[in-house]
Image: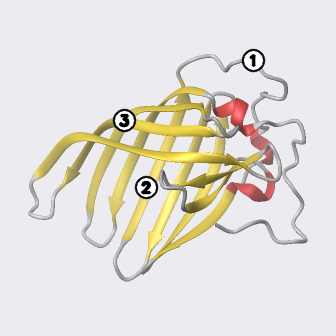
Amino acid sequence: MNPAAPDASPDSGPDFDLRAYLRGSWSVDRTLLDRRAGTRGTFTGVVRFTDDDDGGLHWREEGTVRWTSFDGAPFTGPASREYLLRPADTAAVMDVAFPDGRPFHRMGFTGQSNQDVHWCDPDTYRVTYTVLGPDEVGYRWDVTGPAKDQLLESVLRRLDAPVPETGAAAPDARLAG
């Protein structure tokens, strides 16, 4: 996880509350590209961001993955993953952790916080978060290294109305990127 550089300004929306914005259910559509093998796949499903006891969120996604297996045969099956989102130094960002609490990366959609890097031996994972609309966000993982060369692009669309909470307005799409 890479905190913002000391001279980087914090996110521009002081009233933006990422936790409040994400809470609820979202559809997810993800494209998967293994550049080395030349194979493509998809993941479709639902992401649920639910309250956690520590003031953060529990991130759970479930759906169906379609992928070409190592032997070239098509594979379709269930897939899921979970993360923990923890409060950070500002309400506009959250620290993402693996279910066992190990740090993963920082998540944000505005200003300097929309990009981060995670090194997972032996590969580097670079993420960019983008606001696509008031109820639609995207993120892109570019994974490079000796073991992997992949591009994973996800779009989340809100399925339910956000729970009213002060500062829960959507981030301004002009601030991202």
Q: Quadrant of residue 123?
A: bottom left
Residue 106, compared with residue 133, is above or below; it is below
Sequence-first disc among 2 and 3: 3
Q: Amino acid at mark 2?
A: Leu
Q: Which residue is mark 1?
A: 164
Residue 110, compared with residue 28, is above or below; it is below
Q: Position of residue 40 (x, y in %)?
A: 28, 55
Q: Which residue is mark 2?
A: 152
Q: Quadrant of residue 33?
A: bottom left
Label 2 element class: strand
Sequence-first disc among 2 and 1: 2
Cα distance, mark 3 to mark 1? 25 Å
Q: Position of residue 117 (x, y in %)?
A: 60, 68
Q: Residues within 10 Å of mark 2 (few under 14, many from 20)?
A: some
User: Which residue is located at x 79 percent, y 28 percent?
Assistant: 169
Give the tally of numbered discs: 3
Q: Nearer the viewer, mark 2 or mark 3?
A: 3
Quarter of the rendering occupied by the N terminus: bottom right
Q: Which residue is mark 3?
A: 62
Sequence-first disc among 3 and 1: 3
User: Which residue is located at x 53 percent, y 21 percent?
Assistant: 159
Q: Amino acid at mark 3?
A: Glu
Label 3 element class: strand
Left or right: 105 with respect to 166? left
**Residue 78 bears which disc, if any?**
none
Left or right: 94 with respect to 12? left
Q: Amino acid at mark 1?
A: Pro
Residue toward you, 60 or 114: 60
User: Which residue is located at x 42 percent, y 81 percent?
Assistant: 122
